[in-house]
Image (cartoon, coloured by chain):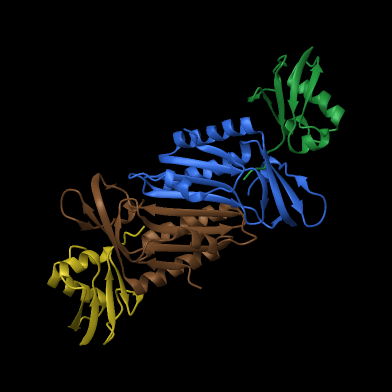
Chain colours: A yellow, B green, C brown, D blue
Amino acid sequence: MATVTVLYFASLRDASGVASERIESTAADLQTLYAELQSRHGFALPANRLRVAADGEFAKWGDALRDGGEIAFIPPVSGG
Amino acid sequence: MATVTVLYFASLRDASGVASERIESTAADLQTLYAELQSRHGFALPANRLRVAADGEFAKWGDALRDGGEIAFIPPVSGG
Amino acid sequence: MKRFHLSEVPIQIAPLRDQLSHPTAGAFASFEGWVRDHNDGRAVDGLRYEAYLALAEKEGERVLQEAMDKFAIVDARCVHRIGDLAIGDLAVWVGVSAAHRGAAFDACRYIIDEVKSRVPIWKHERYREGDPGWLHPEPDTAKE
Amino acid sequence: MKRFHLSEVPIQIAPLRDQLSHPTAGAFASFEGWVRDHNDGRAVDGLRYEAYLALAEKEGERVLQEAMDKFAIVDARCVHRIGDLAIGDLAVWVGVSAAHRGAAFDACRYIIDEVKSRVPIWKHERYREGDPGWLHPEPDTAKE
């Protein structure tokens, strides 16, 4: 069981209704965590269209959750 | 016999010592005119490194001299 | 030194450009992204950019450093607006100075391409008709 | 409308850029040629540009019109200085607006390449040591 802060941006924030939330999860990795949150919030974007970041740096979907860590799911970007 | 005004730019002006001059010439074409002037002024640039203009437009080396016309020999350009 | 910045206020071009001048720099290439009045055939009234600030600044800085390493340039800067923008506003500015123009153009193009494809910034468009929305382009449609 | 100009006074960039703004233009690419302090390994103190005015304006205008015809751009401008310039001075400015950035970059590059290779303008450099001279580059060395 890990407690993490999850940040939501753009359409993920609109769907979740919050900019961030604290989550307790037993997910083995970030991929599984996204699947849980996608199911809870009804995110339209599949994981393969996102990137994931942990503690302010890009991370791998197979990375484990760090207790107290900060996770961000990065939807396709549209700057410029 | 045609009377033309010849314009000199850049290194051709330095070599001729004038910005323009009126020339009477029996040259059959612009190529021959350049050969005459190159011989007179000691221009270092061969005709194949120049372009030629007549009356404010690019011309062909084989064009005849127009009496009263304005001829310019265009050394390799170096703007920008 | 920071070469990439996010700005909540209008971008001032002249001081950015002046930072790139150098006696050995003979060429300067720049790119500006302006807010258009249409996108994908829909009339746009205005838009908003949002960023994941901490990561956007790191990733933007990496893009600029890559450009410094890959191309024979003297220096480069990029500033991206966040917040609310109107039609015609400057959304992003890229400037590159170099001894020769080939490297300046290539690096400028590299920077805007990479910033648009990698830096976590999102555009929210308000349309003249219909609901506003976030743009999450497919990789092969992110061409403008 | 004239899109190419020769200028005997310092080029003012902001009004040129503003002429190119348009609600459909989302991309703007520009190029500036700055006077460098060296050329071909020689220290340069300053330089002078001279043009065959009548033909330079016609040929410059043709280059800009070609860019308008070849690329999907909204508008374009080019101004080239003539007269005496010091190190760091702006020698030439090119600006292009377009719906998308690819065309803006390509047209900007086309314009500066063609202006440098075709428009009758000549550069006279004063060196820190030795005699000043006109630059008459070989075709395959005219790359900067």
Specify whether C25 is left or right of A24: right
- Residue depicted at 63% across the width and 47% down the height: D143
From this viewpoint, which residue is outermost toward the front?
D9
Q: Is residue D27 above or below residue D56?
A: below
- Residue depicted at 42% across the width and 60% down the height: C114
Residue A16 appears in which quarter of the rendering? bottom left
Q: Is residue A20 above or below residue C82?
A: below
- Residue depicted at 51% across the width and 73% down the height: C1
How many numbered callouts?
0
Q: Residue A22: percent from the left, percent from the top? A: 20, 82
Q: Residue D49: percent from the left, percent from the top? A: 67, 43
Q: Is residue A78 above or below residue D80?
A: below
Whether residue A5 is visible, yes or no, is yes
Whether residue C136 is visible, yes or no, is no
Specify whether D72 is left or right of A2: right
Specify whether A61 is left or right of D4: left
Q: Residue A64: percent from the left, percent from the top? A: 28, 81
Residue B41 appears in which quarter of the rendering? top right
Q: Is residue C7 above or below residue B30?
A: below
- Front residue of this view, candidates C74 and A57: C74
Q: Residue C3: percent from the left, percent from the top? A: 48, 68
- Front residue of this view, candidates D48 and D117: D48
- Residue depicted at 42% across the width and 63% down the height: C79
